Image: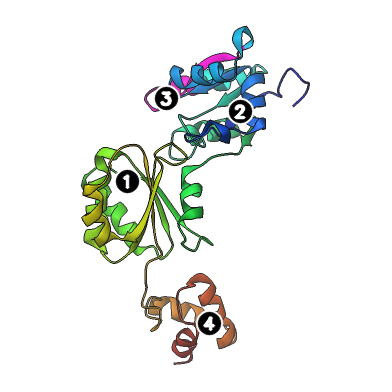
């Protein structure tokens, strides 16, 4: 940032609150106030922040960046940055570039050698994962599932094959169907459900998928949902969740068996190190 009144030319990805306006950071306020332009998915989402920040006549210029017109919108934004302007990109809520087209604009800016800066803040995926009670050393982020067809089946299979916790977003009108689909694959897998995160009627729930499909049809299905699938229970006491091919590859590393077992345990934390050692020793 060069002076009190202007930002360095570049693209600023500004995280905005999911619901509670108190979650807007001071840096986000500063960037939204001082940027040459602010771009959002809708003009309403941008104007809302101009009004809340009481920018008046000093407000930045308004730009759009929509999925349906991202090529045209992106070209305009990149052109302005190339001319020496600063552009703040926001999503409707949360962190831009996460499960929205913003990542493509970032890639194009980087390809042109333009500066890109994050202004970190709220993110529904990380918020839900942090309070899910599931191990979060590593996780799989799926975002929104495809709505139907082969793509949806493939996505469900990916989730089932992942031993790590998996984070999904879902809309209210597809939420129950998604629970049903997930349950049909592995009914005893645990799931954490966050509804209307940080808002007045925020709700959290945790249980098995089989319980979820029984209980949620009787609950309020409104607002945005963030789902966290718990780690898949691979036959952890038998070590059979690790394929024989992986065992063979570990042997080919030509390191002590104890070290190989420790290495595989790092990759597959739910596995029994004792059983991995036994299989490596066979």
Q: Residues within 10 Å of mark 1 (few under 14, many from 20)?
A: some
Provide residue 59's location: percent of width, then percent of height: 60, 13
Mark 4 or mark 3: whose residue is earlier in sequence:
3
The circle drawn on residue 145 is 1
Residues rendered magenta in the picture: 59-74
Vertical relation: 256 (above or below) 46: below
Q: Residue at x 47, y 34 (%)?
A: 19
Question: Which residue is situated farthest in the front direction here?
Answer: 200
Q: Earlier in the sequence, mark 2 or mark 3?
A: 2
x and y, in percent, of residue 217 in the image: 21, 48
**In the rendered image, which quarter contains the N terminus?**
top right
Disc 2 from disc 4: Cα separation: 45 Å
Q: Which residue is mark 4?
A: 261
Q: Quadrant of residue 67?
A: top left
Taking the image as shown, residue 273 lies to the left or right of residue 86, namely left
Q: Earlier in the sequence, mark 2 or mark 4?
A: 2
Local SS, label 2: strand
Q: Position of residue 221 (x, y in %)?
A: 28, 41
Specify whether residue 142 is painted magenta: no
Disc 1 from disc 3: Cα separation: 20 Å
**Would residue 40 be seen by someone viewing this image from the given angle?**
yes
In front here: 211 or 39?
211
Which residue shows up at 31% across the image and 52% down it?
Answer: 155
Residue named by callout 3: 66
Residue 239: x, y in percent? 41, 81
Query: How far, Cα to Cα, is label 2 from label 3?
Result: 16 Å
Describe the element under mark 3 as helix, strand or loop: loop
């Amino acid at each position: 940032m060069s002076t009190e009144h202007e930002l360095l030319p570049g693209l600023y990805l500004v995280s905005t609150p999911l619901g509670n306006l108190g979650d807007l950071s001071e840096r986000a306020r500063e960037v939204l106030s001082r940027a040459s332009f602010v771009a959002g998915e809708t003009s309403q989402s941008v104007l809302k922040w101009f009004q809340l920040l009481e920018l008046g006549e000093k407000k930045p210029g308004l730009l759009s960046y929509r999925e349906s017109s991202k090529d045209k919108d992106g070209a305009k934004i990149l052109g302005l940055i190339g001319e020496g302007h600063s552009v703040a990109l926001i999503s409707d809520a949360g962190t831009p570039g996460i499960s929205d087209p913003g990542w493509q604009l970032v890639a194009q800016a980087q390809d042109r050698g333009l500066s890109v800066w994050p202004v970190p803040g709220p993110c529904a995926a990380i918020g839900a994962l942090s309070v899910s009670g599931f191990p979060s050393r590593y996780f799989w982020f799926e975002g929104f599932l495809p709505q139907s067809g082969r793509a949806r089946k493939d996505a469900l299979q990916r989730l089932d094959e992942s031993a790590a916790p998996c984070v999904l977003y879902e809309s209210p009108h597809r939420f129950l169907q998604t629970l049903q689909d997930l349950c049909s694959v592995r009914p005893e897998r645990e799931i954490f459900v966050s509804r209307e995160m940080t808002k007045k009627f925020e709700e959290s729930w945790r249980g098995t998928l089989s319980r979820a499909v029984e209980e949620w049809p009787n609950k309020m299905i409104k607002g945005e949902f963030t789902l966290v699938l718990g780690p898949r229970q691979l036959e952890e006491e038998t070590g059979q969740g690790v394929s024989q091919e992986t065992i063979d590859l570990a042997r080919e590393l030509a390191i002590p068996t104890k070290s190989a077992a420790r290495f595989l345990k790092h990759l597959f934390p739910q596995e029994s190190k004792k059983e991995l050692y036994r299989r490596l020793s066979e």
